[in-house]
Amino acid sequence: MTPPGLEALFATEFGQPPAVVVRAPGRVNLIGEHTDYSLLPVLPLAIDRSTWVAARPTRDGRVAAHSCQFPGRAALLRDAPDAGIARPWHRYLAGLLGQLPEAPPGAGAQLVIDSDLPTTGGLSSSSSFTMAVLGALSHCWDLGLTTAALVARAIVAERHVGVESGGMDQTVIGLATAGAALRIDFAPTRVRAVPLPASLRLVAAYSGEEAPKGGPVRELYNARVVGCRLAATLLAADLGLAVAGVPTLAAVAGAPGLDAAVARLPAEASAQTVADRLVRAVDPLVQLTAARFPATAPVRIRSVARHVLGEAARVAQVEEALLAADLGRAGRLLDEGHASLADDFGCSTPALDGLCRTLRAAGACGARLTGAGFGGYALALATGDAAAPVLQAAQAASGGAAFPVRASAGLTLSTR
Ligand code: NG1
């Protein structure tokens, strides 16, 4: 439901009612963590918390935006959106304008943005902001972009911010169905709704540690992306498979002899060492959208590949368990996923591990970190009977920052 007061606030800010209100949900990921940028499948769902953008077109070539969460009204020139921007959220907005180059000359817009998504990490507040703003601007400027086109542009916009992320968040935010998780395969993108059993309940709980995508989390995330590229390159060479362009683990997944080849991978190496050893260019291994990863920095390889390949197999298994309404099995697979993220991928924290143990002890079928990790949120899967004690335990453990989540529909747009 649109937050009460959003349209009245728009009228106060801009003197007229909005022409459109766009809602973009956040998401939790059931399983398939850190698999999307290897072009391997994921199984997230859109949740009943969202970002809303109320908007109206103007003809002054400016984008004026008020956010209920962040201070300082943005006033960006469409032609030179980067000029003199100080606040991070204004820079983010400017990045989005760069993704709509076909907007007609003079097109401008007024926006009011509100959200009930926590911005502390893991529930996709940034992608929901991105999708809601792109959806609103596309409507205001009559660009006729399909949801799939908005998703593609939102993915690129997000990478320009510095995290070389995959396409899970934007795709589920765009294309989710209420009451279902969304199985997403990549390259090419294919989606199918996986209806959730009626007895399934989900609880999101905050670990108390922020995981903002500026600074250290960005570096840790990008180091995993490069680790996956190095693993894919070495595995392909070992197994005699061809890889072209940017190497991905999807190119080797399912190959005969893969497990033994994974065991032969080095624990760590730098991109330069791998490129030298295989007599290849280092660029496709380290070039990211917004930066170049340091070629001589050692990154984890073997355990990262083990996690990603095992996690991709769990996506199919959790989908099967949900379709069979076997929540016990689904929960065990979520627990396995968490252990793999903690032990092999190295993106959990003691606080997330402790929170997941608490949720399981309170009766959850399974619990795991959700999203990129390094802090942020955990997700518990429970049956109807156990939902209340699990929520209580989650609220006690997180100081109140825990809530039930329901599978909601993706991007919605209502004209006024
Ligand atoms: P978060 O940080 O939870 O929104 C990130 C990436 C996803 C995916 C997950 C890990 C962004 C926008 N999204 O999600 O593409 O790689 O981590 O599975 O960075």
Image (cartoon, rainbow, N blue to C red):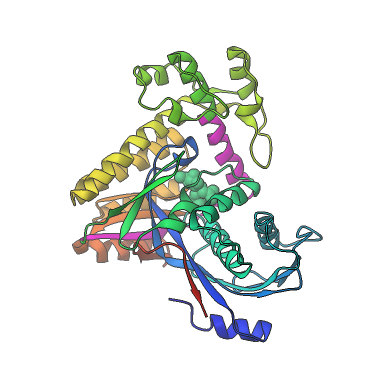
Q: Residue at x 49, y 82 (%)?
A: 4
Does the magenta portion include 221? yes
* Location of residue 34 with respect to 90 vertically, above or below: above
In this rendering, position of residue 231 left or right of residue 106: left
Q: Residue at x 61, y 70 (%)?
A: 140
Can residue 374 be seen from the camera position used here? no
Q: Quadrant of residue 201?
A: bottom left
Q: Position of residue 64 (x, y in %)?
A: 70, 72
Does the magenta portion include 194? no
Tell me the quadrant of the picture where the N terminus can be found: bottom left
In this rendering, position of residue 120 left or right of residue 45: right
> Total marks drawn?
0
Q: Residue at x 35, y 60 (%)?
A: 177
| Residue placed most toward the observer, 17 or 225 | 17
* Location of residue 90 with respect to 193 vertically, above or below: below
Q: Position of residue 57 (x, y in %)?
A: 65, 74
| Residue placed most toward the observer, 119 or 76 | 76
Q: Which residues are magenta?
A: 199-228
Can residue 127 be seen from the camera position used here? yes
Residue located farthest toward the right when viewing the structure as drawn:
84
In this rendering, position of residue 10 left or right of residue 208: right
Q: Position of residue 409 (x, y in %)?
A: 38, 64
Q: Position of residue 65 (x, y in %)?
A: 67, 71
* Location of residue 74 with respect to 316 vertically, above or below: below
Q: Quadrant of residue 379?
A: bottom left
